Amino acid sequence: MPDFTYAAAGAAAPSVLAHLALHVDTARSRGEHSLGSVPDEHAIARMIDAAFWASLRREEGMQPKISLAFLTREQAINPLVLEHPIQLEPAALTRLSAVVERRGVHLGVAYQDGGLLVWGMARTIPKYCCVVEVAEPGLLVIKHHRGEAQAKFVNVAVLQGDSVKVIDEDASSLPDCPSLLTSLLAFDSPSTWAASVNVLVQLAVSMRAHGRGGVLLVVPEASDHWRHSIVHPLNYEVSPPFSELAMLAGGPADGVSKRAWREELNRSVEAVASLTAVDGATIMTIGHHVLAFGAKVARRKGGTQIEQLTLTEPIEGTAARILSPGEIGATRHLAGAQFIHDQRDSLALVASQDGRFTVFAWSPGEGMVHAHRIETLLL
């Protein structure tokens, strides 16, 4: 009998192992070094099991936020090492959750003395290091480090209750796949993790995190054609356009350290993402100049009402569906879909209050709006 009781742990472990083994072997064949160790199925299942049951507990009335990373103390840089390692058990993890709830801090898990133990805490982990993170009670994300300081971790699988969603690595091969989705699925961290895409990913993560829902319309840089799909007058038009994010997206200025630049970029991303919490849509150019927020989307004069679209989710075992816009969400989703139906050179990012996140883009190959559900990639 396995020494775990959460059935989804055993169901997810083989897929996670196959993913990590494939990418670590590929990286080694490219001559890369200092890569994360690949845990076996037992270690993956045990980490998932312990994290799941710990997520359902409380510590002084607080919901635990826990991140487990499979690595030895030698693979971490300046780790905090416990003199006496602790057992990988829910109660022990819950007691330690307060010290690792902040972003970028992980409990280090490794085999010691014939068993899996928590040996301490690490802030710096190697590329492809396997991480099991508690997003909320009963919701876990298995991910790996991308190998870049500011890059979002790559999600491998999402588990919620008895639901196991394994990310489909081939989803980026869909026709007319938006670069934002391609970047989130960039398991090997190729050149798709470009500055412009990086900023959109950070905006998407921040929009989802504030929990209020929102719409971000990304329009061409030197065109006012988007105005034909917006109700006038604009109550919150920005003049001149807010350009701080545009300036920071290009990288640090001369004499500015990377750390200071990253901090400023993060603050700017959060400021722009917060605008999307205002009822209506925030409008930003592809070059990250904010033009307006709180804008109401309307069907373009002379245009047609969107009647159907394609919906896909980058999850193994799912297929594309043709749906009416009303079947995928409420007002925000309808607005985003209609805007892209009219403005086919734009992109719409839509966050729901319930955590769903959809990217709408026009697909020339399909001849219709394509809705990409990506919340599993943003956790």
Image (spheres, grey):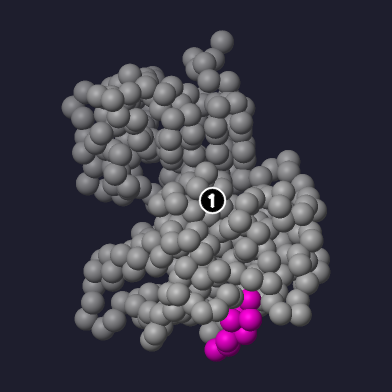
* Nearer to me, 260 or 46: 260
In the drawing, does residue 342 fall left or right of residue 117?
right
- The image quadrant that residue 343 belongs to is bottom right
- The spot of residue 331 in percent (x, y) is 61, 56
Res 70 seen here: no
244 vs 249, nearest the viewer? 244
From this view, report whether residue 134 is shown above or below residue 259: above
Q: Which type of secondary structure does the marked residue at label 1 adopt?
A: loop
Q: Which residues are magenta?
A: 222-229
Instruction: Determine which residue is flagged by label 1.
Output: 352
The type of residue carrying mark 1 is: Ser
Q: Which residue is pictured at 21% across the width and 38% down the height?
A: 80
**What is the total number of numbered labels drawn onto the structure image?**
1
Q: Is residue 232 magenta?
A: no
Residue drawn at point x = 62 percent, y = 52 percent: 330
Residue 299 visible in the picture: yes
Q: Residue at x 41, y 65 (%)?
A: 275
Q: Using residue 297 as the reference point, say whether residue 243 is left or right of it.
A: left
**From this viewpoint, which residue is outermost toward the front?**
233
In this rendering, is residue 211 above or below 273?
Answer: above
Q: Residue at x 61, y 33 (%)?
A: 164
Task: Pick out the residue farthest to the left.
Answer: 83
Name the one closer to the observer, 220 or 71: 220
